[in-house]
Image: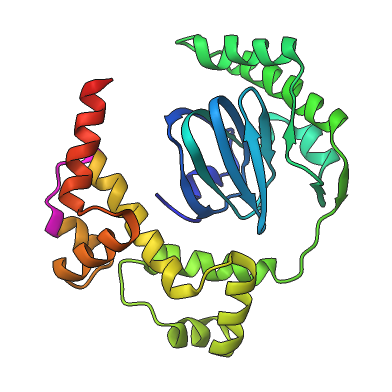
């Protein structure tokens, strides 16, 4: 889990298509465009502090450099497609400097089936077909959406703060040190962060570290001790305490429950 996702921020053609069950993801941003399709359930999408409910069968598009997060409402099956703007250069030109009033849209059934057939079902995805599908989806979104000028107030500073945390979450982070490096007064940073992200800096850092730890607990066989230290916690005791307070279970129980869930499927 990388908050400023450099893998999703390159200048060359990028297409990353993944299917998730019970999908949740902390606040992050990247230069690429993100297409979300809710195949089952309901997903809470937060963009720039505004919340949207994406229901079964709906799609949403998160435009470049927009701060966003996801939270499943009950069980979900979600397709997340992150793609660089050079896949759809004309669409990127049309929406440059604009934001959609609402990121959610009911995609035309034929376009949706076209997308599912060529981007989900096919084992070998043709680059030409993917570009054709993305243009069809983006065109449908563009025709059905209202756009306004993108507001820049405060967004650049929030991006810098999120990037700072992403780069240094393994270290001891203090608001004072962050303020000194970014050139602002600590209380001002704290106020701007809380206003835009809706939680304080310390809680966000803990959430970020816990999210990183959860991914490693599920996807690696690394020891809990090494995961704790490499996720930015100074001791296993502190890691266990914070993890329990945020997830309702210990790291060991979380890893065991994830293994049982995979075996059941």
Looking at the rendering, the stretch of residues picked out in magenta corresponds to 219-225
132 w.r.t. 177: above or below? above
* Residue 158 x/y as whole percent: 61, 68
Residue 33 lies within the magenta run: no
* Residue 154 x/y as whole percent: 70, 71
Residue 223 lies within the magenta run: yes
92 w.r.t. 211: above or below? above
- Whether residue 78 sits left or right of residue 233 in the image: it is right
- Whether residue 181 sits left or right of residue 184 in the image: it is left
- Whether residue 161 sits left or right of residue 156 in the image: it is left
**What residue is rendered at 59% in x and 14% in y?**
116
* On-image quarter of the C terminus: top left
92 w.r.t. 154: above or below? above
| Residue 209 in sight in this render | yes
* Residue 182 x/y as whole percent: 55, 81
**What residue is rendered at 45% in x and 37% in y?**
23
State the residue in front, 243 or 12.
243
* Residue 106 x/y as whole percent: 75, 25
């Amino acid at each position: 889990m990388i908050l400023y996702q450099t893998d999703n921020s390159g200048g060359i053609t990028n297409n990353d298509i993944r299917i998730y069950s019970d999908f949740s993801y902390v606040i992050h941003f990247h230069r690429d465009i993100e297409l979300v399709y809710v195949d089952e359930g309901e997903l809470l999408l937060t963009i720039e502090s505004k919340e949207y409910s994406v229901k079964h069968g709906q799609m949403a598009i998160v435009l470049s450099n927009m701060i966003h997060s996801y939270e499943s409402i009950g069980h979900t099956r979600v397709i997340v497609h992150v793609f660089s703007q050079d896949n759809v250069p004309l669409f990127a030109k049309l929406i440059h400097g604009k934001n959609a009033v609402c990121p959610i849209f009911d995609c035309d059934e034929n376009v949706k089936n076209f997308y599912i057939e060529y981007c989900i079902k096919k084992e070998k995805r043709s680059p030409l077909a993917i570009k054709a599908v993305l243009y069809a989806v983006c065109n449908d979104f563009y025709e059905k959406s209202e756009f306004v000028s993108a507001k820049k107030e405060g967004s650049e500073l929030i991006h810098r703060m999120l990037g700072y945390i992403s780069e240094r979450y393994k270290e001891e982070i203090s608001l004072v040190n962050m303020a000194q490096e970014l050139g602002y007064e600590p209380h001002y940073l704290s106020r701007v962060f809380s206003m835009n992200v809706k939680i304080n800096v310390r809680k966000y850092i803990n959430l970020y570290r816990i999210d990183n730890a959860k991914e490693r607990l599920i996807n690696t066989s690394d020891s809990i001790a090494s995961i704790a230290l490499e996720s930015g916690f100074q001791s296993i005791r502190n890691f266990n305490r914070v993890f329990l307070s945020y997830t309702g279970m210990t790291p060991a129980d979380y890893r065991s429950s994830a293994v049982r869930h995979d075996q059941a499927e």
